[in-house]
Amino acid sequence: MNWIKVAVITLSTIAISVLVALLYLQLKEDISFSLLKTAPEIVQIRTDDLLLRYPNIVGIQVVSADLSKNIRYILYTSIRDEEVKKLYDLFLLKSITTEVPVFTNNTVQNTRMIRLINHEYVCSPFEETISYDFLPESGKYITTVCAMSIPPDYGNFDGIVGVFLRKPPTELESDILRIEIRSLAELIWKESSKKD
């Protein structure tokens, strides 16, 4: 009789494991960290160009945000550093969600987000960003994230342009980045307005 109990428990465990694996694969297919929508080609070109012109930039990410649902979506990511690219690609491969919260239970991150929603230009240590929570290994390559809202002007909030830096910017570099990010955010807003 004991062998029957063992067989039933073993078969039940296998069945549950198969169901969990199938559910995971379905979720992975339906809800992967792939992009729900992508940035227009002109935005991708300008983002890549900005990345190439400044050696201190490790990567740039364009994110769309839906405040009513408290979620943000990656529209486009451009990465120069090969090690960071490998980490990011591995993260996308392993992720089963497209939804990253706008607001979390982290006060520092929420304060940063409120400043961005209020259209401030914000430079923060990488460790204080939600990106660090998802890819802490990138902290070896990234020290600072400077960001601005999309659009950069008051009245609307559609997302964020984040620039990931190898070392903290000097005051002059920060001023130049502010201008560059603002220009990119304006382009993104203009292009997204064309679709609506």
Image (cartoon, rainbow, N blue to C red):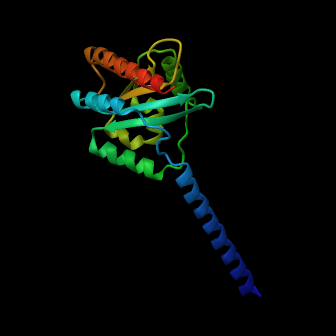
Residue appearing at x 55%, y 59% in the figure: 25
- For the image, the number of numbered tags is 0
Residue appearing at x 48%, y 20% in the figure: 116
Query: Residue 161's spot in the image, x, y percent?
Result: 41, 26
Q: Is residue 184 above or below residue 32?
A: above
Q: Is residue 170 above or below residue 101?
A: above
Q: Is residue 165 visible?
A: no
> Which of the pair 191/157 is nearer the observer?
191
Q: Is residue 66 above or below residue 3?
A: above
Picture quadrant where residue 67 is located:
top right
> Which of the pair 163/107 is nearer the observer?
163
Residue appearing at x 33%, y 39% in the figure: 140
Apparent side of residue 110 relative to residue 122 in the rendered image (left or right): right
Looking at the image, the residue that sits furthest to the right is 1
Query: Residue 55's spot in the image, x, y percent?
Result: 22, 30
Residue appearing at x 45%, y 24% in the figure: 194
Looking at the image, the residue that sits furthest to the top is 154
Q: Is residue 102 visible?
A: yes
Apparent side of residue 2 relative to residue 47 in the rendered image (left or right): right
- Which quadrant would the N terminus be assigned to in this image? bottom right
> Which of the pair 147/130 is nearer the observer?
147
Q: Is residue 137 above or below residue 24?
A: above
Query: Residue 43's spot in the image, x, y percent?
Result: 35, 29
> Which of the pair 118/109 is nearer the observer?
118
